[in-house]
Every structure is written in C-alpha cells, then in structure tokens.
Image: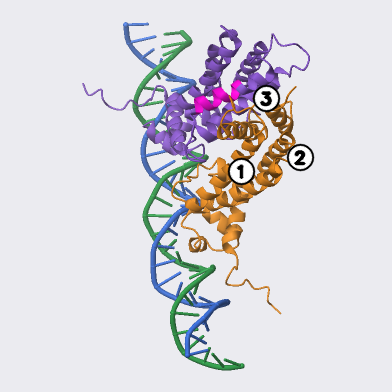
Chain colours: A purple, B orange, C green, D blue
Amino acid sequence: MSQTRKPYHHGNLRQALVEATLKLITERGPQGFTLAEAARQAGVSAAAPYRHFKGRNELIAEIARQGYILFGDLLEHAYNGGKPTPISALSKVGRAYLAFAKRYPGHYIAMFESGVSLAGNSALALAAERASSVMTSAAETLMADLPAKDRPPAVMVSHHIWAMSHGVVELFARGTPGGRAPFSPEDLLESGTGIYLRGLGIIPK
Amino acid sequence: MSQTRKPYHHGNLRQALVEATLKLITERGPQGFTLAEAARQAGVSAAAPYRHFKGRNELIAEIARQGYILFGDLLEHAYNGGKPTPISALSKVGRAYLAFAKRYPGHYIAMFESGVSLAGNSALALAAERASSVMTSAAETLMADLPAKDRPPAVMVSHHIWAMSHGVVELFARGTPGGRAPFSPEDLLESGTGIYLRGLGIIPK
DNA sequence: TGTACATCAGTGAACGCGCGTTCACTGATGTAC
DNA sequence: TGTACATCAGTGAACGCGCGTTCACTGATGTAC
C-alpha cells in the first residue's frame, strides 16, 4: 500500500546528480552550483554525493565527458562522411554545432567554460580527443580535392572553423555583448564559414 | 615620524577594489571572487566596498566598462585607419586583440565571460557600443575597394572576425581543450583571417 | 587665518546563512552455501 | 528455498568557515564665513 515512501536507495543517484547540475549551471554559470544544491534537487542528503564523486570538479568533469561524447556523435552524424557534398556537409556541421550549444547548454558550459582540466582525467581527455578528431577528419575530407600545394594542414582548418563556431556561440548566441546582433547565429556562422571556404578555394565562385 | 600608520581614508579605494578584483577573477574566474576578499586585498574592512559599489555586479560592470574603453582604444590604434594597407592593418588588429586578451585577462573575462548585462547600465553599454563600432568601421574600410555587388555588410564581416578572434582566445589561448594546439594562437588567427580575407576577395592570390 | 560644521569614507561588531566535509550510523541489496 | 552475512548507498547531525549585509559609530576632509 504505502509504497510511496521514499526508498532508501535512490537507484540512479549518480546520473540524477549530473542532471541536477546541468540545470544549475545552465541557469547560473559554471561556478554557480553547489554540491549541496545538486543533492537537494536530487532529493537526497548533502552527504550522499560523496558516494559517487570526490567533489565538484569530478562532477563537472563527468558532465564534460558526457558532453564530448554527445558532441562527437552529433558532429559525426551531421558530417556524414562529407556526403552529399563536402560543402553542404560542412554547413550541416555548423548547424549541428550551434544546435548542440543551444540544446545542451549545460554540457557546453562544462566543456568550454568551466575551466575543467583534461590533464589527469583520461576518460575526459579521450572523449575530447575523439570529438576533436571528428572535426579534423571532416576538414581532411573537405580538402581532399584541393591541390596539395598551399593546402593548409587539416588540424589548422578544423581549428579555424571551431574557433569561429565557438565565437559565434559565445558572442552572439547568448545575451551579452552588443545586445542582439542583427543576424541570427545560424546566418552568421553559415556566411562566415562560406567566405572562409571560398578563401580556401573550395567554393569556386 | 610614525606616519606609517594606516591612514583612515584609503584615498583611492574604488580603483583599488577594481584592481584587486582583476587579480582575483584572473586567477579564479568570473564567479571566483568575493567582495570580502577584494576588500581584504585592498587592506580595508569588508563593509568599505559598499561605499563605492552596490554589490558584486556593479564592481564587475565597472571592470567591464574600463575594459571596453581600453579595448576600443587598442583596436583603433592598431587599425590606424587601415594604413598602410587594409590587410596589414587587419593583421595588426588581430594581434592587438590577442594581446589585449593576454595582457588584460581580468578585463577580458569581465567583458566576455562574466555574463554581465549591458542592459540597464548605460555607461557600460556605451563603452561596448563604441568598441563594437571601431571594429565595424574597420571592416568598412577594409572592403572599400570591393565591388559593391555581393559585398557583405560590414557589421557581418566584423562579427565574423570578432567571432574567430574570440574563439581562438577561448579555445586555444587558454589551457582547456585538446591541451596545447600545434599552432600558436597568433598563427592560428592570422592564418584564419587570411583565408577569410581571400574569401572576401580582398587578398588576390 | 581661524573656526564651526557638514559631509565623506572609513571601522568593527553583529546577524543569519549555506556550504563542504566528516562521522558513526542504518536500511537495502546481493550472494554463498 | 532459506538463512547468514558482507557490502553498498544512503542518513542526519555536527563542525568550522567565509560571505553578504546592516548598523551605529568615528576619524578625516572640505568649506562657509
């Protein structure tokens, strides 16, 4: 009957803490959460999180790790091996990047704004590495048809695109500087990467 | 003789608090400072800051304001009206951007990473506006010789360049993702904007 | 030049609060036999 | 199938701490006359 009693064991506290923290950092920024509050939101005492995480940092690192995995999957799927054309595929990657930042702001914050360190956390470093390699190999495919002479390194190209994407997210997809830009983040990124690709010699016109 | 006694009045507490806070946010991020600690570092009681600022937010906003002024000045000086050539001038602007982020990390953080709101703070909004207009008018000069047809709006171009610059700072000039990139931030930004400018049709080759 | 007084810019004590962390504990679950 | 027991995943109380904020106060400075 009275099975509505709180069960003593949560069952999935680890992930519940992750999700509570995602909410908190989405609302208040990477430093704006406390273990105590995450515990409270998960309906658990303040001491409980210590059964699963050594402290704040480990929790944030776990969120970043999950984020990098999601991120890598999304980008890979969007790029789809560069089909049907490298240019259209890259445009999809750009939109996927913005969509990720928008749909998973907590993960994005943990990954790129929390100051979490990759060193000393091999699971996290691995996930980040893998996401990064997706972008690099996309850049590789992108330039496959280019004459080898003065073709820039793929890593460099992927970093350029990554930088512009990240910059658009931070400056124009959130609320801060210049208020609202006169262009949507999507338009801004698509036009920016378009001009960049023309500079690379990939778009002819 | 014993004039080494602490004077009752600080003399320049407002600015001293600004500088203490700059140090703190440089070391610990935008949320990692407290009014109490800033006061301590300025050698003053915890209640004293309230004579100058209503609270944390007002202090950070003041830092951002000073930052935008510095930033605008630096960029304007670096661009120097587009002389001797627009391309060389833009390259100087890029380096000035990175130099600003490196030399004034506290200001940079307050401006772009603290989540400070421009709305409801006209002095801050004004300074930000002005820095933004420096970049836009630089983009304008840059494209002056371009045929008017399919020349993108100057605001858009300035946003592209700003986004890439900011992305390079956040992703590759700090310590976080991918560890150290194989290229220096300066090289990355210069090559990136170079390719972008070629895409615009400004660099012929 | 001196004096009275208003104003300014600090002090320091006090408050309530929430956090991080530890501790001995206990209820629930899994497993060996 | 039942039982004994180890292990796991929670509790709740306690601690020390630092913060934000307010308050009546006081020392220093500026100014009117």
Residue sticking out furthest to the left: A1
Residue designated by label 2: B84
Is residue A33 visible in the rendered structure shown here? no
Q: Please indicate whether residue A65 sits to the left or right of residue C4 in the image.
A: right
Foreground tag (2 vs 1)? 2
Which chain is indicated by disc 2? B
- Residue depicted at 56% across the width and 51% down the height: B65
Amino acid type assigned to the residue bearing label 2 in the image: Pro
Task: Please give the range of residues in magenta.
Answer: A185-194
Which one is nearer the viewer's eye here, B127 or A117?
A: B127
User: Quarter-wise, where is residue A69 in the image?
Assistant: top right
Amino acid type assigned to the residue bearing label 3 in the image: Gly
What SS does tag 1 mark? helix
Which one is nearer the viewer's eye here, B131 or D12?
A: B131
Q: Residues within 10 Å of mark 1 (few under 14, many from 20)?
A: many
For marks 1 and 3 on the same chain, the one whose residue lies earlier in the sequence: 1
Determine which of the numbered discs, if any, sits on residue B134 in the image. 1
Magenta stretch secondary structure, dominant: helix
Residue designated by label 3: B201
